[in-house]
Amino acid sequence: MLLDEIGPERALPVHAAMDQFAVCAGELRVGGEPLSRLAARVGQTPFYAYDRALLRTRVQQVRAVLPKSVKLHYAMKANPMPALVGLMAGLVDGIDVASAGELKVALDAGANPQEVSFAGPGKREAELRQAVAARVLINVESFREVVALQAIGSELGLRARVAVRVNPDFELKGSGMKMGGGPKPFGVDVEQIPALLDNIGRAGLDFEGFHLFAGSQNLRADAICEAQQKSFELALRLAQAAPAPVRLLNLGGGFGIPYFPGEQRLDLAPIGDNLARLAQRAGSELPGAALVIELGRYLVGEAGVYVARIVDRKISRGQVYLVADGGLHHHLSASGNFGQVIRKNYPVTIGNKADARSTETASVVGPLCTPLDLLADRMTLAVAQVGDLVVVFQSGAYGASASPQGFLGHPPCLEVLV
């Protein structure tokens, strides 16, 4: 009997809070496809799969709470897969890139250069030249960049479009990675901004506004609202020294997704209400300025899974090890080696036995010759055998592109958009 003939899908929770994917006849469905059939379609394991419907739904959820005047940008460092960027370019208002390589992907995907911004603390002169020629907005992060952009603009006969990335004197409380406050390689310290703005004016650059990004991976709506309010107030003060009226204020993002037991999904409603108040203030206090929210992980993280196949089952002194054909070289963050101080398990399931009643405590390891190659440490999983499919949820962001795929010479993984 075909799976499609078994009956309607059941939205079974295959892991705490991992209810975005349906289960039918015991198999996880991604993009409407049963996992085993999807694996056959891809042609190999391991692979990443990103669900188009979930990506669209997440953008719609954010749009539903954002004031219409607030622009939504996708920070493509979270996932630069070209097909995914192409989809996102048609759903959001702009794309934020962090290298010339990402810039090419964004432009190839059809992103409007007017709504593309380029950030990064170490932009090479060649990258700056590409950005000026493409007429995208450059987030200036040093005095050196001002000098370089003036020379490049003269060479190309173009005025570089710039915003100033500010290293604020506060941070996003409770964020996974703090991107502002204290000494940071990102942006320019707020105390130095007036001098930088003066240099921008004298260099004849086309000043458009400010970019503030205080932190990432935050599940506290109150902390995000506080950071947005402080960023807005700071921009008001800095605008007094600007060489031209502020036309854009990028308030960053920081919206997190749940990875670990006990974590809950972010409540968007208070953030939407807060942004509505700020947008109303901007209408009178920063007339003509567009507010921008820049999201990466939040838009794509929950729409992706990493899938590997079990190639061996071993028992060592009573502990079950499921050896998979993929591991930290493809999914560094799930192994706990991408920013975790204390390793915690990502949500994991046996994807072709997603509603199995027979379970055991097992560890999922990869094929690499290192004890760091660990995808699940003593988790309760369906009893699995060679050939079964291991699924790591919350894998749509900082997966393939953030992992050392050349490590130990194993094959790279594939990525598909379904």
Image: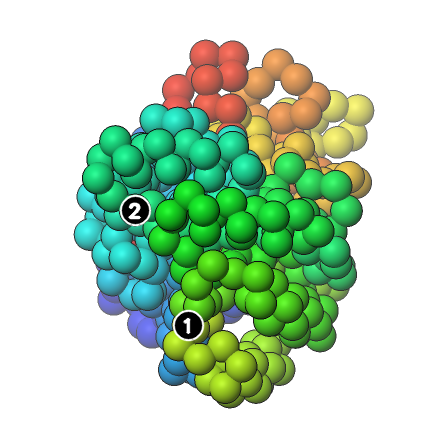
Q: Residue drawn at (25%, 43%), measured in percent from left and top?
A: 158
Badge 2 element? loop
Amino acid at dot 1 = Ala
Q: Look at label 2 and name its amino acid.
A: Arg
Instruction: Please indicate, yes or no, whether residue 94 appears anywhere in the rendered image.
Output: yes
**Residue 367 location, x and y as percent?**
54, 21
Q: Is residue 62 visible?
A: no
Q: How many labels does the image show?
A: 2
State which quarter of the image contains the N terminus.
bottom left
Q: In which quarter of the image is residue 74?
A: bottom left
Q: Distance between the residues labelled 2 and 1?
A: 21 Å
Asked whether, in this view, residue 197 is left or right of residue 189, the answer is left
Q: Mark 1 points at which residue?
A: 290
Residue 418 appears left or right of 379: left
Kindly report which numbered mark, 2 or 1, lies closer to the viewer in this rendering: 2
Residue at the disc numbered 2: 159
